């Protein structure tokens, strides 16, 4: 899933982001408006990470979101 898809459906992914980064408040997550650079900045601040580490965590989280809203196939 590319980031523009995530951003356009951010309301569907906010709960998952909150679960991944529990130190962020609901307001902080909602306030990013699905903008990756804003999420990265919040993650860096909350977890004292470098930009590269925050971006890596976001990429890992993004990869896990692919199947969440996709229809199940057998």
Image (cartoon, rainbow, N blue to C red):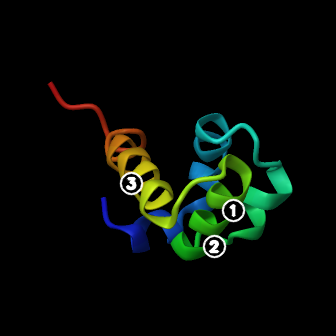
Taking the spot 67% from the left edge, 72% from the top edge, the residue there is 33
Are dots 1 and 3 in contact, CB under 8 Å? no
- For disc 2, the marked residue is 38
Q: Which residue is under mark 1? A: 42
Image location of residue 42, percent across then percent down: 69, 62
Mark nearer the N terminus (3 vs 2) = 2
Q: Are dots 1 and 2 in contact, CB under 8 Å?
A: yes
User: What distance separates the C-alpha of mark 1 from that of mark 2?
Assistant: 6 Å
Which residue: 60% across, 46% down?
17
* Residue 49 picture quarter: bottom right
Q: Residues within 10 Å of mark 1 (few under 14, many from 20)?
A: many
- Front-most of 3 and 49? 49
Question: Residue drawn at (77%, 68%), measured in percent from left and top?
Answer: 31
Residue 73 at x, y percent in the picture: 19, 31
Residue at the disc numbered 3: 56
* Residue 63 horizontal/vertical position (percent): 32, 47
């Amino acid at each position: 899933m590319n980031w523009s898809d995530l951003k356009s459906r951010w309301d569907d992914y906010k709960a998952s982001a909150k679960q991944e980064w529990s130190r962020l408040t609901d307001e902080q997550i909602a306030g990013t408006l699905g903008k990756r650079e804003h999420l990265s900045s919040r993650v860096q601040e909350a977890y004292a990470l470098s930009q590269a580490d925050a971006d890596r965590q976001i990429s890992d989280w993004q990869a896990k979101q692919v199947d969440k809203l996709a229809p199940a196939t057998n």
